[in-house]
Amino acid sequence: MKNQSLMTKLLALCRARGFLFPSSEIYGGLNSCWDYGPLGVQLKNNLKRAWWTDMTKRRNITGLDSSIIMHPKTWEASGHLEGFTDPLSDCKDCKNRFRLEDSCCPHCGSSNITKSRNFNLMFKTFMGPVEEDSSLVYLRPETAQGIFVNFLNVQKSMRLKIPFGIAQIGKAFRNEITPSHSIFRTREFGQMEMQFFTPPEESDKWFEYWREEREKQLLSLGLTFRWKDHSSKDLAHYSKKAGDIQFEFPWDWDELEGIHHRGDYDLSRHQKFSGKKLQYFCPEKKISYTPYVIETSIGTGRLFLALLCSAYKQEEERVVLKLSPHIAPVQIAILALSKKTDLIDLSQKIRVDLEKKYFVDYDDSGSIGKRYRRQDEIGTPFCVTIDFESLEDKKVTVRDRDTMKQERISIDSLPSFFLKSF
Ligand code: ATP
């Protein structure tokens, strides 16, 4: 890994400050499973809200929240039952199972290994009380299929005209052989996906459009990245054309988001397997056709990790998370300099006012220097300190996280100050 120490320090901070905890830690944890702590869930919700707003503010994008468990035929139609596999071998000596990349076992070096067999990455479970083949169901490996099977329900109920898109945020599950880099590749993860339905002849134009739109949103969160086209041998079975938005993680450049031109693969396959027509009737041309699909797909946890990696700065006398003010889990910290009643009353009044609009933290204990450091480490863009003079001159000190500059501002003008700053 290029920058192992950044990853180690970042994970230590995430744990100490309540962003991320290993799942079921008191039982020794569970490989690849993570819990988002109080600040982590706030940051994750802010990311989801930013993505959701950016999508659904458009008149032709609508939302959906489909079920995680779907009819098993869905996965036959989507190609996941047949094609969503990794070739695995078993070591007859140490009994480990692994992806065969070399001629011997990567765990013990033995060459006493089985021939590789395809292993499906979908999680299986049983629906109802009887564990038999007829009750076998899968946890979805992507949120996209819930959108495809609802294509006509959404189009008709919302009277949508093509081109239009359906956005969805939800959990997906993949029994990854090599989960890695904490929340980068896990077996249970969040996805934010949007499927955009277009006339076939316009699909190339919309592919470029959505690539640019996604890049704009990631830039607005303060990220830098690069684009990588998929070569024809890397294309997924459903894809006509695709590329990744990659971020430079501490180990290397790696995929953050995928943009895929899925053609009419999904709708055609669901039509075939369900026997139900999934076509759009164009009222102007008076013809029915199967639209093409452009997909944007980003992992919520991957975006979370990329933002933390890019925000983490080790400066001479402090560690600071330079998160964009829009997504910071705490936007303003109210710090009362002492626990004197008048001071606390005034501080609480300011807190109640600002809380109507911003995520606010309140802290009145410990040295002010330590309190500033804690807020820097969790990425709070502004601290408002209330001191004894505040009781007289009705002014407070506002400290900027990035410049550490302090400014004396009248309490009355705090709302307009923050309106300009966020
Ligand atoms: P990778 O090869 O990096 O595991 P992928 O090419 O299989 O990803 P897609 O199927 O295109 O990924 O999924 C779309 C997005 O979902 C990815 O860009 C990533 O952000 C996220 N994602 C996919 N698999 C995982 C996972 N196991 N853990 C966390 N996020 C994931």
Image (cartoon, rainbow, N blue to C red):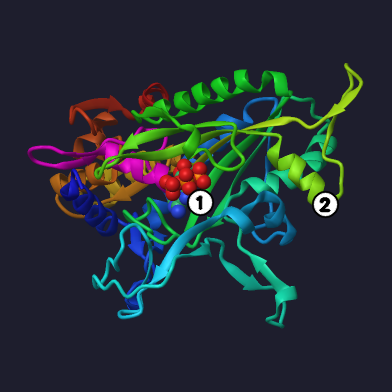
Tag of residue 274: 2
Q: Is residue 334 left or right of residue 292?
A: left
Q: Nearer the viewer, residue 394 or 386?
A: 386
Numbered range of the magenta stretch: 301-328
Q: Nearer the viewer, residue 373 or 383?
A: 373
**Residue 234 shows up from this direction:** yes
Q: Would you identify the image quadrant in which residue 292 lies?
A: top right
> Crowdedness of circle 1 by 10 Å Cα count: few (<14), some, many (20+)?
many
For ligand 1, tell me if the residue under mark 2 lies within 8 Å.
no
Foreground mark, 1 or 2, reads: 2
Q: Quadrant of the C terminus?
A: top left
**Residue 44 shows up from this direction:** no
Mark 2 belongs to which amino acid? Ser
- What residue sits 41% from the left and 39% below the top? 256
What is the C-alpha distance between the residues marked 1 and 2?
Answer: 28 Å
Mark 1 belongs to which amino acid? Gly
Specify whether residue 317 is painted magenta: yes
Q: Position of residue 193 (x, y in %)?
A: 58, 41
Q: Is residue 143 left or right of residue 183?
A: right
Q: Position of residue 62 (x, y in %)?
A: 69, 35
Q: Is residue 416 left or right of residue 242?
A: left
Residue at the spot of label 1? 190
